[in-house]
Amino acid sequence: MRRFTNGTRRHYACSMVLALTLSTFLAFRSDAQSPQSEDVKPVPLFTGSAGFVTSFDGGEAHLGPIASPVLLIPLNKRWLLETRATFESDMVQEPGLSGFHGKVAKAVDYAQLDFVANPYLTVTVGRFLTPFGIFNERLYPVWIRNLQTDPLILPIGIGPSNASTGAMLRGGFKAHPQFDINYAVYFSALSTASPADSDRLAGGRAGIFVPHVRLEIGGSFQHLLQQERSNSFGFHAIWQPPAWPLDIRAEYAHSQRGSGYWVESAYRLSQLAFFHNEMRRVQLVARMQRFIAGILASDSLPAVNTKKFEFGLNYYFIDGLKGIGSYGRQFSADGNKNVWTLGLTYRFVLPLGHAGSE
Amino acid sequence: MGRRYILLCFLGVMAGLTFSAIAQERTNSATSSNAATPAPTRVAGATPAAKPASPSSAATAEDAAAVERALRVEGEKRFRTNCGRCHMAPHKFPPRVMATAIRHMRVRAMITDEDMRLILHYMTR
């Protein structure tokens, strides 16, 4: 299946090594400005999330316990070692057996070493979440996502197991007094070591963020260097109007295995005058999505054109702990169905050492 | 087809190098013009609200307090703009915890260097 020539491979390897060496070299030369404020020494952290999400998918009940620990080890002034693992189960009622049963799936989501070379560039090596679109890298953890079901287009452009194995250059900087630019370019090698498998691919994502209107728009591009050697691309937009407690996010992705979009808005009821203390903890969410099947088949994407509408209600008990509930209706040629979810998600942050006084 | 990949890689390499070069340029000028100023104040110099006072008066406690206040206001503003974009903006953690989380967010969320310094200053005071 893999058809890449040694010549192309050599070119790639050379360019990547050259980029990493030069940027590292330049970074060491520019160490006059330390990337982190001198007076606070970061401490290693054990953080992450846990959740329990029950869903009723087309009438079938699923119990979904999930734990996703993250280990962050800052080294020196410029380095960060970060890794996340996920343990989750999808438990269903088996015919003839009582109770719910399911296997625990384990995955190393990422295990990467980041080097903050200078204010414009961070070099990452290892296994990292593929920065295609916004959901995988920014919204995936259960404590962050507004709706617990994955967007239909999520599998586009992120590779098997959502991660890449290789190297990435990324950064964010003020390009103009009115806006910031962020970018990521990466290369991933083929890995078949399940569950840490990845595809051979190269790609990039760039975004423009306008702080005073809190608007980000951006695009992603990726070229698969194996199998059909196809291109994928996508666009994203995030807007949080400063005057309202409203989040609007949208993403479009296109690949030969399918394309589609989702648009989500989430409104926090913090501006309501009655029961203010309770209402400000409530968030209403609505998401609409559409998926159009591609010319090639995929295991992880729907086989047929699909539309989905979802409505959710989240309740933020305290920082990090939220109750979630949602209803969705999916329409496709395979049959229409309802999807309900109900659950609890939690994010924790524990220092592994002296945390410093407040 | 092969050429396209090489072009893509070259673009990546060029982007990395250009940013490194610009960064170095800026670093050099910042160090030579303002070497003795502590890092947060140097950042504040970039924001109109927190322009450092002239050298003769900078030593007075009132000026230091005014700079500190301005840094805090600017830090809070940057926190509100940046830290609730993907998840609910977190509450304050102890300083060393915040320092790690912000380094993590710098990488993950591509928070700019200046935003990171101001937010860290605000969140750890």
Image: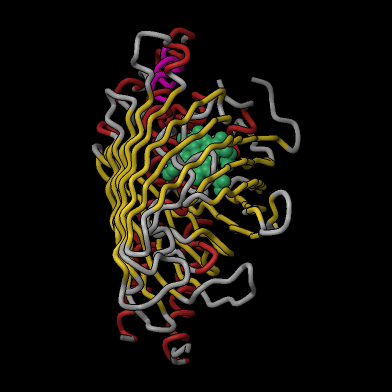
What residue appears at the point 50 percent right and 41 percent down from the top-left corner? Answer: A341
Q: Does the magenta run of residues contain B74?
A: yes
> Closest to the observer: A203 or B28?
A203
Question: x and y percent of residue A167 in the render?
Answer: 51, 66
Q: Which residues are magenta?
A: B66-75
- Residue A77 image offset from top left, x and y in percent: 60, 45
- Dividing the picture into quarters, in which one does residue A152 lie? bottom left
Q: Residue at x 71, y 58 (%)?
A: A96
Quarter of the image with the C terminus of chain A in it? top right
Q: How many marks?
A: 0
Q: Residue furthest front?
A: A96
Residue A173 on image: x %, y %: 36, 46
The overriding secondary structure of the stretch rendered in magenta is helix
* Res. A233 visible in picture: no
Q: Residue furthest right?
A: A353
Q: Residue at x 55, y 69 (%)?
A: A165
Please say if A41 is above or below B19. Answer: above
Image spot of residue A350 (x, y percent)? 69, 35
Residue found 61% across the figure and 47% down from its top: A64
- In the rendered structure, the answer to whether residue A344 lies left or right of residue B83 reads right
Residue A84 lies in the magenta-colored region: no
